[in-house]
Amino acid sequence: MHSSDTSLPEIQIMEELDEAGRLSARSSWQAGVAQGPMTRYGADGEVLLQAEFRQGRLSGSLRIHDEFGALLRVASYAEGRLHGEALSYRDGKLASRQQYELGLLHGPCVAYAQSGLETLRQTYLMGRLDGMAEYLQDGVVVRRESYRLGLLDGETRDYAADGTLLAASPYRAGVLHGIARRYAPDGAALAERRYVNGAPEQPWRRLEPADSEPSSPTFGARLEKWIRG
């Protein structure tokens, strides 16, 4: 009876040198495929990249730095695909925070200005926008959209910097459908236009005060600002 050796080959550490003979990369290999940590270095020995591999595919944490050592990217991988949280940095400050599941955006995603204030809030469902999306300027919402399975679905609202509602546009399955309205600074509706499956049924119709909502425009504007945040 013969026994066969089923043990895995030993992991080998490989190093790469640049033209000047300086260490530029160190990685772990097993049976000809990347297995374990990999690190890349700059000309002055600074770490540019740190990654983990399993059976030749990214799996675990990935960290990328610029030549000055500032962090550019931190992400998690599983079987070669983004899986978990991914962070991007600009000039040393957090620029975006995203969530992934098996390579697809899934969950809340946020973008940031250099000041640290949020500029974008979105939610994804297996790679497609789903739910509320908000665009912000100086920390204040200037546009709000509603998505369903990657398509605009619901009312999209645009705001002035002071919180005043400027326009409201209804969408269904990615196209305008319903009555779109434009508003005055005091919150009163100025004009409206009806859409059916993306096509306008009529030109913009100017609204007279009697055509506007019965509630006080001033109160309506204040309420809208409060809801908007």
Image (tube, rainbow, N blue to C red):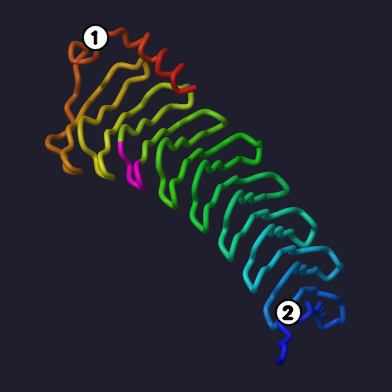
Q: Please count the marks in the image.
A: 2
Q: Which of the numbered marks, if any, corresponds to residue 180? A: none
Vertical order, 153 against 29 (above or below): above
Does the magenta-highlighted stretch encompass residue 226? no
Q: Looking at the image, which residue is at 86% across and 81% down?
A: 20
Q: Are marks 1 and 2 in contact (CB under 8 Å)?
A: no
What residue do we see at 27% from left, 38% from top? Answer: 171
Number of the front mark, 1 or 2: 2
Q: Name the spot of residue 15 as percent of width and height, x first.
A: 82, 78
Circle 2: element type: loop
Q: Secondary structure at mark 1?
A: loop
- Residue that numbered label 2 is attached to: 8
Q: Quadrant of residue 76?
A: bottom right
Looking at the image, which is closer to me, 17 or 193?
17
- Residue at image position (52%, 58%) is 103
Which residue type carries mark 2?
Answer: Leu
Query: Residue 169 appears in which quarter of the rendering?
Result: top left
Dot 1 amino acid type: Pro
Q: Position of residue 177 (x, y in %)?
A: 21, 37
**What is the number of the mark on residue 214?**
1
Q: 160 above or below 48?
A: above
Q: How far from the left and from the top, in percent, is residue 174?
A: 28, 45
Residue at (66, 36) in percent of width and height? 115
Q: What range of the chain is rendered magenta?
A: 148-153
Mark 1 or mark 2: which comes first in sequence? 2
